[in-house]
Each structure stands twice: as C-alpha cells, then as structure tokens.
Amino acid sequence: MAKDEVLLLENQLCFPLYVASRLTTRVYTPLLEELGLTYPQYLVLLVLWENDNLSVGELSKKLYLDYNTLTPLLKRLEDKNLVIRKRSPSDERSVKIQLTELGSDLRQKAFCIPENLIVSLNNSVLNLEEIQQFKLTLNKLINALEK
C-alpha cells in the first residue's frame, strides 16, 4: 500500500467495524423496543441472565464498559424495576447487581431477539455459516486487541 493510501478511510480496519456495530445496533433497536430496552440495557441483562448477582466490576469487565458508562445504565434498569443494586455485605465498596422478578421474567420474552436478528441477516447476502465464521474472527480480533 502506498504511503498516501494509508490514511484513506476505506483502508482503515476501524471504520467497517464501527459502521457494522452501528448498523447492527440499528437492526436490534426495533426488536428491543418491544421489550422497552435499549441495546446497552439488553447487553447488561444478557450477562445477568447468564450469571445473576454480579458486582459492577464484574459487569464492567464482561461488557468492556467503564464504570462511568455502566453506572447510569444500571440506574435506568433499576428505575424500570429490572435490577436491584445492593452493597455487598462482605465488602461495602462493592455493589452487586441482581435481577428482579420482572428482570428475570423478561428473559422469556427476549428469546425471539437473536432468532429475529439471524432471520433478518439471512435475508441478506450472508448465510448462517458466514455469520458464525465472522463472529469467530471478531472474537480473535478482540483477543488480539486485549493483549
């Protein structure tokens, strides 16, 4: 690649990742509106449905979110009565996040979300195998960037 081409937008790895992320979120938005959730709220709930009663630090690590981003997100989920924030009895500095009954029950309604997303992508130029391979490649990239 010629030196003057290095800074062309079309030659940047970050740009297609950024655009794909924004467009993926756009596809999720109408599906999540039916549940009254934003995409970041959905991600928090996915983690909690898998492992309830995590600390804010554990959530932060799993979601790659800073505390400054996660705290207001958790506050909004608490306002919707989907989670409860409690200080850990063993360590007052640690805040644990627990699903409420409403938050747990929302999981059943969310089962259609991944399926609907795959259906919408299957109607495009991608097939399921390509989607799964792309996810594996993205995970490799994430692991490499973490080091």
Image (spheres, grey):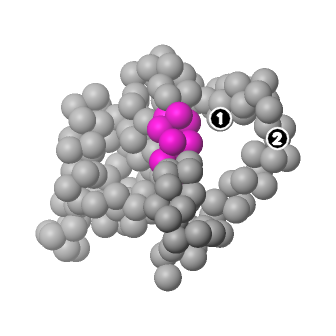
Give x and y (percent) for residue 105: 49, 30
Residue 35 placed where, x, y %?
46, 22
Q: Please give left or right for residue 74 compared with residue 43 in the image.
A: left
Query: Where does label 1 land, which residue?
Result: 114
Q: Residues within 10 Å of mark 1 (few under 14, many from 20)?
A: few
Secondary structure of the residue carrying tag 2 is helix
Dot 1 amino acid type? Pro
- Range of the magenta residues? 17-25
In the image: residue 125, left or right of residue 28: right
Checking the image for residue 128, the label placed there is 2
Closest to the observer, 121 or 8:
8
Give me the residue at 20% from left, 44% from top.
Answer: 72
- Asked where in the image residue 1 lies, by quadrant, the reply is bottom right
Query: Is residue 7 depicted above or below 81 in this figure?
Result: below
Tell us which disc is closer to us: 1 or 2: 2
Judge whether residue 24 can be spotted in this image: yes
